[in-house]
Image (spheres, grey):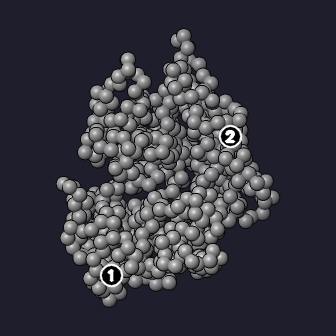
Amino acid sequence: MTDTAAVCMEHITKTFGRVCAINDVSLDLRRGEILALLGENGSGKTSLVNMLSGIYFPDSGEIFVHGKRVMIRSPKDAANLGIGMIHQHFKLVEVFSAAENIVLGQPGSVSMSKKRIEADVAALAQRYGFEIDPAKKVYAMSVSEKQTVEIIKILYRGASILILDEPTAVLTPHEIEKLFAVMRKMKDDGKSLILITHKLGEVMAVSDRVEVLRKGEYIATINTRDTGQAELTEMMVGRPISLRIERPERPAGEERLQVVDLSCLNAEGFKALDKVSFSVFGGEILGIAGIAGSGQKELCESVAGLYPSIGGAVLMKSEYEGESVMEPILGLKPDVVSSKGISMAFVPEDRLGMGLVASLDITDNVMLRSYKNGRGPFVDRKRPRALAEYLIEQLEIVATGPGAIVGRLSGGNVQKVLIGREIAQDPTVLMVAYPVRGLDINSSYKIYDLLNEQKKRGVAVVFIGEDLDVLLELSDRLLVLSGGRVSGVVDPRTVTKEEVGLMMVQDLSRASEGEGAPPPEQLRLDLQMQGVRPGEGPGSGLGDDPDSKQRVASDGHGDGAERRES
């Protein structure tokens, strides 16, 4: 322990029944630094900081805060020591305003005037660069605004040591950049921060040092400037892993899915999709790229029959009297589509809200796809249980067995259950929305392998992602959405990130028409977070002469060869 240490955890061990979550782990956090705590899902990251924040009590080991040995038995003890934790799932009262949530439970908060509370919150927000309306109700906030309230709440209580548990899991690239800017300001103000993550790019971008855990054990601590993503990956997983994503080449098969002039409205009544058209063929992965809010969610859910449309058509290949036909399915419920002999699988963005039931075990979640196939009033649990056991073995799902509750599994294992269940339906079309969001690198590459296996089997795969590098490496064709419209369909093997970036912001004029498109500065930051630097690639950037444009696009209605216009 050094004089500059804000926190020192020495030889911490914690078990839950027969499972040793943390085994003799030490952690050293300095004053005025950002320490990244890195590890795969289930490596013990959250369990370790839960003992620092008072949620768990260690079985053995010692904790020092600012050089003094302490006993942290509750979150109140941690708060009194200046330790605050921002959890993945926010702990806010939805009907209260931001300011009311921030002062809730503080001595004297009942007698304080509303104006004084809001003024104090606004001053604190201005100090660190937060953007917040103190009077806004929580239920009306975006995810990033709720996270801002949680951080300010911790700072308002005088915390000098902040723990952020996977803070970027559901943020857009623009919101992530804003969060990192705030974290740097807090660091400059002398705060000490622990960032729990498994996103290597974020670790390299914002941290000063990295501590790596693997299977509940301490591996190493290293200065961020002295390492790289390949070395960190090997420390996380325990073996060298190629960061190259495979793209097996095979000729495209017959057309499996056709979308024609599909249009949808968002919750505000504006067009989320505006005459979107494309086709997907068997044996290919069609990637869909776009800045957050460009219509990706509405697109996949409307094709799956879970979101209303206002126009267009969706057709899928089916068999009728021995002949192949394109069957219209738009507006039909999933059960009706299935009754027509059409096999489509969908992995939604919200894996535990729309895809699985957290309170049920793996067998019951598998059975959600097959319970109607039974005869009589009783359901058959034998086949779903056998399938659950098969998925656990084949996909290396870390669980006690098919009776394990899904809500208690790590994020990577939850996603494997969901994708495994959908693939087991033997689909001809597989749609996946952000399948690796919140997953560690090992789980992510397992998901990529599963998608490639489906491609090899002749399945038409639609892959909606947010990492442009992954989309360019994995996809056979790439469809780009901008403001709910198709900017083009390009070949990922030949197109550049800069060209795709221009396509993602191609229709900026819609922002001024009030159709919900982000402002140009947000678009610029979104692109930079995906590795695209507008203005540095071929053609014009966001700030260039609008009379001189370079566009790589197709008409959006077919396969889309490249076309340049000047």
* Residue 257 makes an appearance in the image: yes
Which quadrant is the N terminus positioned in?
A: bottom left
Is residue 457 depicted above or below 362 in this figure? above
Q: Residue 133, position in %: x, y?
A: 64, 69
Identity of the residue drawn at 42% across and 73% down: 84
| Observer-nearest of 146 and 473 | 146
Identify residue for label 2: 264
Residue furthest toward the bottom? Answer: 3
Q: Give SS at disc 1.
A: strand
Would you call the spot at circle 2 few (<14 residues within 10 Å), some (14-19), or many (20 or more)?
many
Q: How many marks?
A: 2
Judged by depth in the image, the label closer to the viewer, 1 or 2, is 1
Identify residue for label 1: 65
Q: Residue 125, position in %: x, y?
A: 59, 76
Is residue 387 depicted above or below 437 in this figure? above
Q: Give SS at disc 2.
A: strand
Identity of the residue drawn at 50% across and 30% down: 344
What type is the residue that disc 1 sits on? Val
Tag of residue 174: none
Would you call the spot at circle 1 few (<14 residues within 10 Å), some (14-19), or many (20 or more)?
many
What type is the residue that disc 2 sits on? Cys
Earlier residue among tags 1 and 2: 1
Residue 394 placement: quadrant: top left
